[in-house]
Image (tube, rainbow, N blue to C red):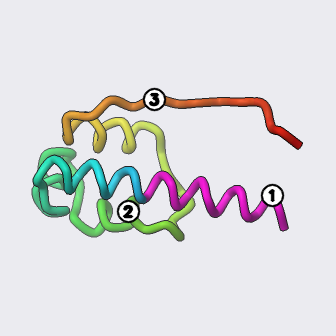
Amino acid sequence: FKKKFKEEIQQLSIAEQLAKLRLESGLTQAQLAKKVGTTASAISRYENAEYDRYEMKTIRKIVEACGGELQILITKSAA
């Protein structure tokens, strides 16, 4: 249960961060999709906390199109 919960939190975090960055950039999903070279429905999937097939290449494109910086944090588990 604990492992699945952590995975769900991570997915929610990615989706929330992408949506927040897009909104802070003043872009609609359609505008962002055009900048990234994809569809609005693909952007919508990436902003959905239940989506679990993220690709680093696409995340990087989304972040850069919004003027953001992608950072990855890897830490040792407390448990």
Instruction: Judge from the rendering whether residue 36 lies leftward or rightward of residue 48; answer left or right.
Output: left
Amino acid found under the numbered disc labelled 1 = Lys
Residue visible at 65% across and 30% down in the picture: 74
Is 55 placed above or below 67 here?
below
Residue visible at 80% across and 37% down in the picture: 77
What is the crowding at mark 1: few (fewer than 14 residues within 10 Å), some, or many (at least 20)? few
Q: Of the two numbered discs 2 and 3 on the same chain, state the one appearing first in sequence.
A: 2
| Residue 13 inside the magenta-drawn segment | yes
Q: Quadrant of the C terminus?
A: top right
Q: Quadrant of the N terminus?
A: bottom right
The percent position of residue 72, horizontal first and vertical second, equals 52, 30
Which quadrant of the figure has residue 73?
top right
Is 74 placed above or below 18 here?
above
**Cα separation between marks 2 and 3:** 18 Å
> Magenta residues?
1-15
To which residue does mark 1 refer?
3
Which quadrant of the figure has residue 42?
bottom left
| Residue 79 inside the magenta-drawn segment | no
To which residue does mark 3 refer?
71
The percent position of residue 4, horizontal first and vertical second, equals 76, 63
**Cα separation between marks 1 and 3:** 23 Å
Residue 47: assigned label: 2
**Cα separation between marks 1 and 2:** 22 Å
Instruction: Judge from the rendering whether residue 29 lies leftward or rightward of residue 19; answer left or right.
Output: left
- Marks 1,3: beta carbons within 8 A: no
Count of numbered circles in the view: 3
What is the crowding at mark 2: few (fewer than 14 residues within 10 Å), some, or many (at least 20)? many
